[in-house]
Image (tube, rainbow, N blue to C red):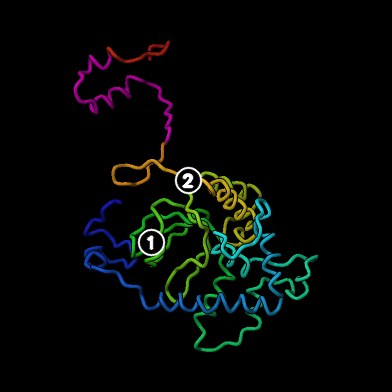
Amino acid sequence: MEAIARNALCPCGSDKKYKKCCMSKEAPTVDIKLHRIKQAEGRLIPGMLSFVRNHFGVKAIESAWEVFNPWHFVPFSPQHREMELFVPWFLFHWTPEEHSPYYEKSQGKTLAELFASFWEYKEETKIERAILEQGIEEPFSYWEVIHAMPQRSARIKDVMLGTEIYIKDPDFSSSVRDHNVIYGKVIHCDGFHTFLGMGQYGMPPDIKISLIDAKRRGEEQGYTIDKSWLQITETEQRKFYLHFHENVEGRQVTFTTNVDGDRVDPRSIVYEIESAQEVFDLLKYLSEGPTEEELLENALYDDNGG
């Protein structure tokens, strides 16, 4: 990983110089606020699932599972790799269809919206309420890891909307690599950004080409590319990720790396030039050993002498 200059801004997002911030920390600690957010999430999600079981029965989860990935259906299992993605989708995005036996009870709302309507506000549960509201508001999207500092933080960018944020989470920053693309739902609570569910697999950076094409098609259809568009196209976004999941599931994916262990992605670059001689004059100084005459003598020429 590239070394951080002493006088560069610290990647943790503090707006301080690195030497004045994380450089001097021998062992990173989890901020108490982040710890409280994670504890609150750990109470909220089980509480929401209990609410669903009481109001809809356990079969509702299996019904939603069939909708979650109809393209590559496998029987529901609590041990499935994508539970960390499915559960937030189930709670915050699944709406029973009109022909579903659960439609009338859901009142056309998501489970999170229905849960919120029964919520009895208490001061000691204000963080849970904030997570619930953010979970309802924020869409799933694709996030590129710009730079990760293991055990500290990661700077990530929403590929679809262009927003850059910091995730100050030791666990997340240690589990991703620079330029991975993560599919997930990011929320902001009590000054922290954190993932409220994400896909199991980090996607390679060249996946952004397909995502940019999807944005272009949305613009051609007259949409403004914003959070509302991501909510409208949630099924298509999820389908794209799950197709990727199926392509890597069950087989070992290997990558070419440099001597530092960083991934190397091959690229083919094609230039259109008007004058071969002009390019030669610019690049000949990069050669060590052969003289200019020797380079020209061994050069390959096309039919036009270029």
Left or right? Give the position of 280 relative to 129.
Answer: left
Report which residue position mark 1 lands on.
Answer: 173
* Residue 3 vs residue 293, the one in the foreground: 3
Left or right? Give the position of 210 relative to 302.
Answer: right
Task: Classify 175 as above or below 262.
Answer: below
* Residue 139 vs residue 246, the one in the foreground: 246
Residue at 65 percent across and 51 percent down: it is 72
Residue at 38 percent across and 15 percent down: it is 306
Looking at the picture, how far across and down is residue 145, in whole percent?
A: 42, 55
Give the quadrant of residue 235.
Answer: bottom right
Secondary structure at numbered mark 2: loop
Which label's residue is closer to the chain start, 2 or 1? 1
* Residue 92 vs residue 293, the one in the foreground: 92
- Name the residue furthest right: 99
Bounds of the magenta segment? 267-296
Task: Classify 27 as above or below 80.
Answer: below
Report which residue position mark 2 lands on.
Answer: 252
